[in-house]
Amino acid sequence: MFGARSVLGRIATTVRSIISPKAVTPPTQTSSAFAMPDTQENPSAEPAVDNTSTTPESTATPAAAVSDNGPGKRKVRAQTTKDRREYAKRKRLERQQEEPRERQPRPEGSEPRKPKRKVALLMGFCGTGFQGMQVNPNARTIEGELFKAMIAAGAVSEDNANDQSKVQFQRAARTDKGVHAAGQVVSLKMIIEDPDIVKKINEQLPEQIRLWGYVRVVKSFNSKTLCDSRIYEYLLPTHVLMPSSETNAEIARTVEFPQRSIPEITAEQIEERRAYRASEEQLQFVRDALAKYCGTHDFRNFTVTRGCTESNSKRYIHSFTASDPMVIRGAEWISLKVKGQSFMLHQIRKMVGLVVLMARVGAPLKLIDALFASPRVNVPKAPGLGLLLEQPVFESFNRRLKNQRSDASSDPVTFEPYMEQINEFKQKFIYDAIVDTEMSDNVFDTWVQGTEIFPEPFTYVNKEGVIPEDALITPESERKWQQKMQELREVEQKLGKAGNQSDDDGEAAGSDNDKDN
């Protein structure tokens, strides 16, 4: 057994092997180890010094700075909880002291500063003709139009025009190219001293983007992190529920992959689809299938993101419902509404796409349960045309606010006061835009036919509900599929075609080739 002096000697030797005697931080100074937390990769980093003891041994090698590392070994620990707290406090004080010196004098002739207030801005938009919600250089986006309008109306100063972070801008949900929102919430610091500021901003916006109003909120409000759920709507024509086409199945069986193509839809077929009315049995199947998604499940098969695992692909769905049918310009549509805490990329479109193919083929409901547990397969992605953000929900925030009414600096974030305006806008700009596009471009019909003429990725959608080996995504299957797609593109180039079998993301028949957009 070693004596106390021998143990202290070994500890001191360990410390000297990491730092030189000159590098030991005096007790009155803060160790520089915090600048280089990883002392193993940065041997010059100094270990933390504990000032609780005045003996020479404990000053050089404090008890709190060593830890066991196996029998007969001792290891220096660079930081303690106390050290980290002191370091954070010191850096915070340094920033506070530096801020006044960093602030530059305002140039002569610049507009005077006006007080800004943190608000939750309630808005809606039709995404047709826009490259998504987020600001993107050289692209027409919803946020780009919103900022231009707010600057013109005096809600945001010219000084803050080119940097969203200056006004603490944040959105509750992201929407992609062409996706609509009946209700969206963005939080920012805005100049609101003008009582007509909402009206003035709307006057500067295109008519397909509308502000419903704003809510004063606390300074710490963040529309993304405080949004506890989101409601999306998917407008679906019921003709996609028609039984699968024998003609398409024959093409898939007899024509080589590169020679296949989706035939032009005839006027007679268009009229047939518009006149189609779903049966009660079909509608009930859709409702039962959507209900399967509710609860907590592993949705790794319902996103295009590579590398999903059970730990990062679980999502909780509150509800998923289908409305009664409604006739819009002679065609029948149903509204699907899903409420969830959060969604992965293209998750909603894939959930809808699978239900549509199951209804056409007559696949059993147990297939959805199987996909929650199975290895990766390609799930068809329904067109983005029918998708819209209904509204973000702030239930927890509003509940806390209700229980703490002494805090008058914030109001509940809700769309209730504006529902009449929202419904009128949704009907005129969003529903009409979806229907107009479908009537002119036959987006849904083209997508459905594509899944049947190019059925190779979806062989698991069958009447037995059995997932065959050839449907699983493997490196070999991906390689073969990419090779087939390359052959198809080469044929199209020779024929001068635009590739009408691909959807808006360039993925044939809505298949999942692990391609993010």
Image: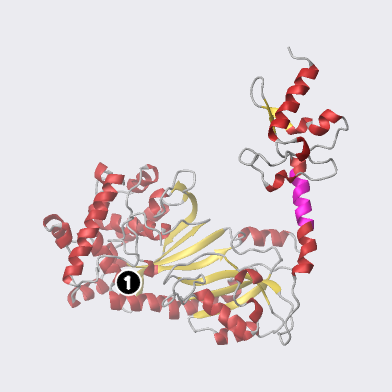
Q: Is residue 104 above or below residue 353?
A: below
Q: Which residue is mark 1?
A: 332
Circle 1 crowding by C-alpha within 10 Å: few under 14, some 14–19, many from 20: some
Magenta segment: does it hold 89? yes
Q: Nearer the viewer, residue 351 or 137?
A: 137
SS at badge 1: strand
Residue bounds of the magenta highlight: 84-93
Could you tell me how many numbered marks the image carries?
1
Task: Give the residue displayed 15% in from the left and 62% down from the top.
Answer: 259
Magenta segment: does it hold 76? no
* Image side of residue 147 versus residue 309, left or right: right
Q: Is residue 243 above or below residue 165?
A: above
Please tell me in which quadrant of the rendered image residue 152 appears. bottom right
Q: Residue furthest left?
A: 254
Tell me where residue 456 appears, x and y as whole percent.
Answer: 23, 53
Q: Is residue 14 above or below residue 418?
A: above
* Image side of residue 33 versus residue 371, left or right: right
Please tell me in which quadrant of the rendered image residue 120 appears. bottom right
Task: Give the residue displayed 50% in from the left and 63% down from the top.
Answer: 231
Residue 214 visible in the snapshot:
yes
Task: Give the residue displayed 77% in from the left and 35% down from the top.
Answer: 21
Q: How is the image coloured?
A: secondary structure
Q: Quadrant of the C terminus?
A: bottom left
